[in-house]
Amino acid sequence: PLQPAPRRIIFYEDKNFQGHSFECNSDCPELNTHFSRCNSVRVESGAWVLYERPNYLGYQYILTKGEYPDHQRWMGYNDTVRSCRIIRNISSVFRIRVYERPDFSGQMLECTEDLRDLADHWHRHEVQSAQVLDGTWVFFELPNFHGRQYLLEKGEYRRFTEWAAMNPKVGSFRRVV
């Protein structure tokens, strides 16, 4: 069987890749023992979701390969990163359906591309349920890929709470490529 490509992310306590660093190549439910704050990140391979709290809780930040010299570059609200995990289901095919009501009812919008402003295609900035048919997607609370981020992997989400949101507000979404 084909082995997945190695994945690697490096966390730095200070901005611009300075200070104490910690290298990670697997899911980690508790990063607190490795560093106290995180002000820059280098994703050397793979796609990752970082969490503000241990055990994959709190604000989510989705990072793909690249350099993030300060926490604003990944739209971090602060310098707190307490857990991380690898996004495993990276695909070349993308399809998502969003619904205005829970349980896949009401008006439906199907997309295969990034959507910068949901209101351009939809009558509101709310999504009550979603089906990820192909690929992995990120919902953003605000238009232009800003605000809180929520990772949606292939599957069904009957209510917004199932993608860990506090409310159904979705301003934009994009594919994890």
Image (cartoon, rainbow, N blue to C red):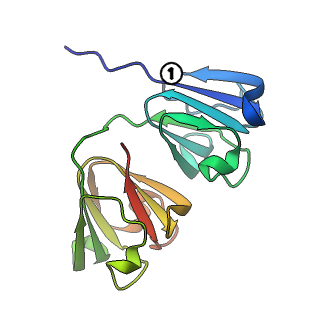
Picture layout, residue 73 above or below residue 173 = above
- Report the side of 12 relative to 133 (left or right): right
- Residue 32, located in which quarter of the rendered image? top right
Count of picture labels = 1
**Front one among 122 and 27:** 122
- Residue 139, located in which quarter of the rendered image? bottom left
- Report the side of 156 relative to 84 (left or right): left
| Residue 163 image offset from top left, x and y in percent | 41, 58
- The residue pinned by badge 1 equals 25
**Front one among 34 and 119:** 119
Residue at 44% from the left image edge and 36% from the top image edge: 47
Which quadrant is home to the C terminus?
top left
* Disc 1 residue crowd, few under 14, some 14–19, many 20+, Cα 10 Å: some
Residue at 64% from the left image edge and 34% from the top image edge: 41
| Residue 51 image offset from top left, x and y in percent | 58, 44
Picture layout, residue 174 above or below residue 71 = below
| Residue 159 image offset from top left, x and y in percent | 35, 68
Picture layout, residue 67 above or below residue 5 = below
Classify mark 1: helix, strand or loop: loop
Which quadrant is home to the N terminus?
top left
| Residue type (three-letter) at the residue carrying disc 1 | Asn
Picture layout, residue 118 above or below residue 64 = below
| Residue 94 image offset from top left, x and y in percent | 24, 51
Residue at 65% from the left image edge and 38% from the top image edge: 82
